[in-house]
């Protein structure tokens, strides 16, 4: 918060000799992961939600939680997931897609969205939060049929 100019002027005038002293510098608020996720959610709601839902059922594009889990399974870290999303949104390309071929064939490619770098990063953080922080993330990053119930429904022994 900046010192109002009137208070600063009073401080200068009231000082012996009227020597000017710079007003105190207040640092800008720190950008936190939570603030980036919140900003990314607002952008998602404004820009992406016309095609993507967060959770199933799907709209005109795959649900973003499903995309996020797929990206988590195929990237080495949360930061790589954020970077991949931020690179994808302005320039979608089939050869860089992490979705499986049947999904790409079904949904096609999204249109390019020329957003500012800060907005792309915020969207990436929101998508990463779906893969790492949400209840849905607890379902695990794998493709399914990983033996969660030891596949008892398919004749598995349970052990």
Image (cartoon, rainbow, N blue to C red):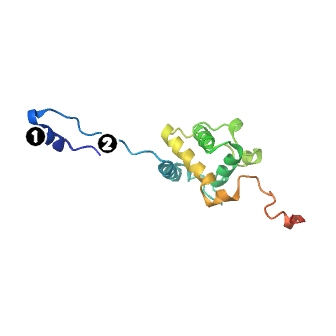
**Cα distance between the residues tagged 1 and 2:** 22 Å
Give left or right: position of 21 versus 49. left
**Residue 149: image x %, image y %?**
80, 65
Q: Residues within 10 Å of mark 1 (few under 14, many from 20)?
A: few
* Element assignment for label 1: helix
| Frontmost residue, 71 versus 10 | 10
In the visual, does 112 lie left or right of 24? right
Percent of width and height locating residue 136: 65, 59
Q: Which residue is drawn at 62% across and 52% down?
A: 132
Q: Residue 68: image x %, image y %?
A: 64, 50
In the image as oriented, which residue stretches furthest toward the front?
A: 16
| 126 or 95, nearer to the observer | 126
Residue located 66% across and 37% down the image: 93
Q: Earlier in the sequence, mark 1 or mark 2?
A: 1
Residue 139 drawn above or below residue 122: below
- Quarter occupied by residue 59: bottom right
Q: How many marks?
A: 2
Judge whether residue 130 can be spotted in this image.
yes
Q: What is the secondary structure assignment of the residue under circle 2?
A: loop
**Cβ–Cβ under 8 Å for marks 1 and 2:** no
- Quadrant in which the C terminus appears: bottom right
Q: Mark 1 points at which residue?
A: 14
Instruction: For label 2, count other residues whose C-alpha is less than 10 Å away and answer few (under 14), some (14-19) or many (20+).
Output: few
117 left or right of 59 in image: left
- Which residue occupies the foreground of this view, 56 or 17? 17
Q: Which residue is drawn at 10% across and 38% down?
A: 13
Residue 63: in sight, yes or no? no
Image disc number at residue 132: none
Residue under the point 48% across and 40% down: 118
Residue named by callout 2 = 26
């Amino acid at each position: 918060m900046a010192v109002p100019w009137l208070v600063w002027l009073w401080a200068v005038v009231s000082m012996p000799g009227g020597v000017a002293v710079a007003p105190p510098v207040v640092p800008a608020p720190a950008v936190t992961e939570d603030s980036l996720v919140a900003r990314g959610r607002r952008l998602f709601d404004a820009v992406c939600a016309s095609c993507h839902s967060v959770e199933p059922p799907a709209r005109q594009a795959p649900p973003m939680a499903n995309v996020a889990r797929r990206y988590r399974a195929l990237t080495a870290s949360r930061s790589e997931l954020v970077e991949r999303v931020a690179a994808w949104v302005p320039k979608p390309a089939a050869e860089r897609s992490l979705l499986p071929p049947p999904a790409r064939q079904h949904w096609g490619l999204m249109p390019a969205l020329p957003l500012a770098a800060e907005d792309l990063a915020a969207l990436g953080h929101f998508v990463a939060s779906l893969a790492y922080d949400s209840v849905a993330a607890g379902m695990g990053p794998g493709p399914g049929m990983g033996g969660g119930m030891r596949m008892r429904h398919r004749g598995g022994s349970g052990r």
